[in-house]
Image: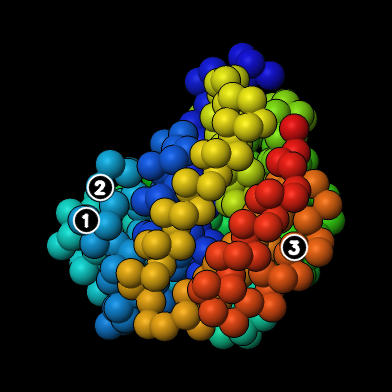
Amino acid sequence: MMGIAKDMKFYLAPMEGMTTYTFRTVWNQYYGGADTFFTPFIANRQLNSRERNDILPEHNVGMHTIPQILTNKADEFLELAEVIAQYGYEEVNLNLGCPSGTVVARKRGAGFLGVPKELDAFLDEIFTKCPLRISVKTRIGVQDDSEWDTLLSVYEKYPIAELTIHPRLQVQGYQGRPNREAYAKAVLRLSCPLCYNGDINSAEDLASVGEVLAKDNAVMIGRGILRNPMLFRQLRGENTGAREERLATFREYHRALLAGYESIMSGDTNTLFKMKDLWTFFGQNFEAPEKELKQIRKAKTVAEYRMAVQMLLQNCPMKE
């Protein structure tokens, strides 16, 4: 395991509504360990304020950040890539992995994988015309594992800067065992750099996928970092301190994150929406937090929320 992690590259996955620039900045300050950060997807030809804020250089200081685009229209992708290039970025990531029903219904994200001929034509145009390097985040199909061979035949045509593979089908969402055999097949067939994504929450999980990792030795983690913000450091074998030290760091991390959202959100309701979503993951890092989590979810003001969080941090030990 230690040999695997020694030269491993760790990426923070893009998670819509979760890994905002506020989250990335605060997490990087208190925990860090990511070699690269990917922004939640940009899906508007005219960037909205959330999307623009996510890619502003001043909101990504000290972080190697790659913006991600969600579209199935080559002209839209190329327009957005031009805008992204103006901010100084040299690479853009294409989202072919989002399993959301609303996204898939429009043949975007993982839904685009269901029409491989259209995807092939799209890739041909953007790789011909795009001024930036293009990396891709993909699933292995929509309905059936057999789709992966066709998709690999498409991907091997193009100079993909890096292909991140979440080896599940769109219909699986985040359920079921990742198909590591499908990832291993990509290692054999593709010459581009590869990155593994899916269900890495511990050193044991990383060791278990070590046999199929490409020589590039890169993994992308999203939900695992939300649950356990020091996961990258643990995977590198760093000393993360005693439980009391870890709790003290989490207190400061949470305080800074809440303050960050308060500073940019309009009113308690929007701030609490962000923080309560995060506790879906944070809560998994504490022992028997159900009662306190219920109070966090019930909070209607930031003041009530702070009291509920304080009670959880007092009553619920962090897991070892």
Q: Distance between the residues labelled 2 and 3?
A: 35 Å
Q: Measured along the vertical axis of the image, is residue 134 above or below residue 273?
A: above
**Which part of the image, by quadrant, shows the N terminus?**
top right
Query: Which residue is denoted by mark 1 in the rendering?
Result: 57
- Assign a secondary structure to mark 3: helix
Instruction: Say how many tags the image has.
Output: 3
Between discs 2 and 3, the one toward the N terminus: 2
Q: Tell me the kind of residue under disc 1.
A: Pro
Q: Position of residue 230 (x, y in %)?
A: 57, 37
Tell me the crowding category of disc 2: few under 14, some 14 to 19, or many 20 or more residues within 10 angstroms, Cα based: few
Task: Judge depth for marks 3 and 1 and give the one in front.
Answer: 3
- In depth, the one of 150 and 168 nearer the eye is 168
Query: Which residue is denoted by mark 3 in the rendering?
Result: 292
Q: Measured along the vertical axis of the image, is residue 289 above or below residue 27?
A: below
The residue depicted at 18 percent of the width and 60 percent of the height is 87
Q: Where is residue 105 in the image (x, y as percent from the top left)?
A: 63, 85
Residue furthest top as drawn = 3
- Assign a secondary structure to mark 1: helix
Q: Position of residue 235 (x, y in %)?
A: 61, 28
Query: Which residue is denoted by mark 2 in the rendering?
Result: 61
Q: Tell me the kind of residue under disc 2.
A: Val
The reply to whether the C-beta atoms of the residues labelled 1 and 2 are less than 8 Å apart is yes
Q: Tell me the kind of residue under disc 3.
A: Glu
Tell me the crowding category of disc 1: few under 14, some 14 to 19, or many 20 or more residues within 10 angstroms, Cα based: some
- In depth, the one of 317 and 140 nearer the eye is 317
